């Protein structure tokens, strides 16, 4: 298990649109503005471990997006808030089932809040493959955030903040 710092363009996110819980997004946004280091790390898997399992459409998406390197396991609200506030995404690279076990142990210490995924890399990738098989489109964290801004799916103050920091 290795901690890494990523940009929103480097991470493929789920196709849930928009984020499910605006209240959670508001909390993470406030924290991300004040002190992003307080937010828990986001679990990711490198594309080299699972791209072949995820299907041809996903492989094509990765090929078309050269910066894209990672598949997010969990953390859509958090990564959206970090992107809206122009912060890097602190991630934990999961490379083995033992990494997942270690990552889940962080729940007990309060380092992370939850982990809504399986106990094995193989099962996580299988679940992602099923999720993406039904998808009509794919998104990076950045493209999903931009879409939420463009379609005004989040509070206006977040949109205003995001647009302001993009200008500077």
Image (tube, rainbow, N blue to C red):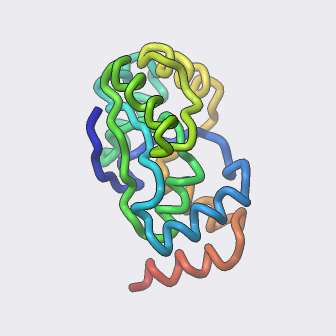
How far from the left and from the top, in percent, is residue 80?
54, 57
In the figure, 25 relative to 73: above or below? below
Q: Is residue 109 left or right of residue 18?
A: left
> x%, y% of residue 145?
55, 59
Q: Quadrant of residue 156?
A: bottom right
> In the rendered image of this protein, does residue 23 appear above or below residue 63?
below
Query: Residue, x 63% and y 67% (percent of image)?
Result: 150
* x then y, percent, for residue 73: 49, 34
Q: Residue at x 53, y 75 (%)?
A: 162
Across and down, in percent, residue 108 comes to 50, 35
- Count of marks placed on residues: 0
Q: Residue at (66%, 65%) from the top-left corner?
A: 26
Name the side, left or right, on which 123 lies relative to 1. Answer: right
Seen in the picture, residue 37 relative to 120 is either above or below; the reply is below
Residue found at x 48% / y 28%: 57
Q: Tell me the quadrant of the picture where the N terminus can be found.
A: top left
Q: Is residue 156 left or right of residue 107?
A: right
- Specify the quadrant that holds the C terminus: bottom left
Report if residue 92 is visible in the image. Answer: yes
């Amino acid at each position: 298990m290795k901690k890494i710092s990523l940009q929103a363009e480097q991470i493929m996110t789920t196709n849930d649109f928009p984020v499910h819980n605006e209240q959670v997004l508001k909390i993470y946004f406030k924290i991300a503005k004040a002190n992003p280091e307080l937010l828990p790390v986001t679990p990711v898997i490198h594309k080299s471990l699972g791209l072949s399992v995820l299907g041809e459409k996903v492989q094509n998406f990765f090929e078309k997006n050269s910066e894209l390197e990672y598949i997010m396991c969990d953390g859509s609200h958090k990564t959206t808030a970090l992107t809206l506030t122009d912060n890097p995404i602190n991630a934990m690279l999961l490379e083995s089932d033992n990494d997942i076990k270690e990552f889940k142990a962080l729940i007990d210490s309060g380092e992370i809040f939850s982990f809504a995924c399986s106990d094995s890399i193989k099962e996580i990738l299988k679940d992602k493959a099923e999720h993406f098989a039904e998808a009509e489109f794919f998104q990076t964290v950045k493209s999903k955030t931009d879409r939420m801004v463009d379609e005004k799916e989040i509070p206006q103050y977040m949109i205003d903040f995001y647009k302001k920091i993009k200008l500077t």
